Amino acid sequence: MPKNVLVVDDSAMMRRIVIEQLRACEFDVNVIEAEDGRQGLERFKLGDIACVLSDWNMPTMDGLTMVREMRKLDPHSRVSIVMITTNGNADNIMHALHAGADQHLAKPLTPAHFKAALTAILG
């Protein structure tokens, strides 16, 4: 049975890249898209999400704030959250992990790194 993956990014092109990576890795998923953190949080509240792949820098609500709000709704971290950002410095990675993200991936995404990071989550 396919798992629902929520892809949150204000860039339509980046959402397409992430979705293409998911398909290229042949993960059995249904993709749900959101254009910013607020929309991502609203879609998350509908339930049945296995994994969230989110950008950090977005209008309306940034990814870090969204992650914090998602963890309030999912305090036992049943949903895996992966931050995908251009800023991979150690401080930002620590902020993301402390907010509740499970992993951090740096842009640009490489297929091998993307697949390795998500295989444990999506099978």
Image: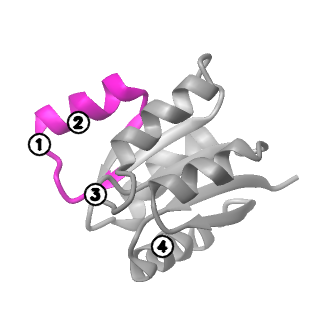
Q: Could you tell me the amino acid type at mark 2?
A: Ile
Viewer-side residue, 94 vs 45: 45
C-alpha span from label 3 to label 1: 14 Å
Q: Where does label 3 land, which residue?
A: 57
N-terminal label among 3 and 2: 3
Q: Is residue 99 left or right of residue 93?
A: right
Q: Could you tell me the amino acid type at mark 1?
A: Asn
Viewer-side residue, 41 vs 80: 41
x, y percent for residue 19: 55, 72
N-terminal label among 3 and 4: 4
Q: Looking at the image, do the residues carrying marks 2 and 1 touch, with CB atoms under 8 Å apart?
A: yes
Mark 2 surroundings within 10 Å by alpha-carbon count, few (fewer than 14), some (14 through 19), many (20 or more)? some
Q: Where does label 2 land, which residue?
A: 93
N-terminal label among 4 and 2: 4
Q: Residue furthest front?
A: 60
Q: Where does label 4 land, which residue?
A: 15
Q: SS class of the residue under badge 2?
A: helix
Magenta stretch: includes residue 52: no
C-alpha span from label 4 to label 1: 22 Å
Residues shaded magenta:
84-103
Question: What residue is at 20 percent from the left and 59 percent from the top?
Answer: 86
Q: Where does label 1 land, which residue?
A: 89
Q: Could you tell me the amino acid type at mark 3?
A: Asn
Q: How many marks?
A: 4
x, y percent for residue 7: 54, 61
Mark 4 surroundings within 10 Å by alpha-carbon count, few (fewer than 14), some (14 through 19), many (20 or more)? many
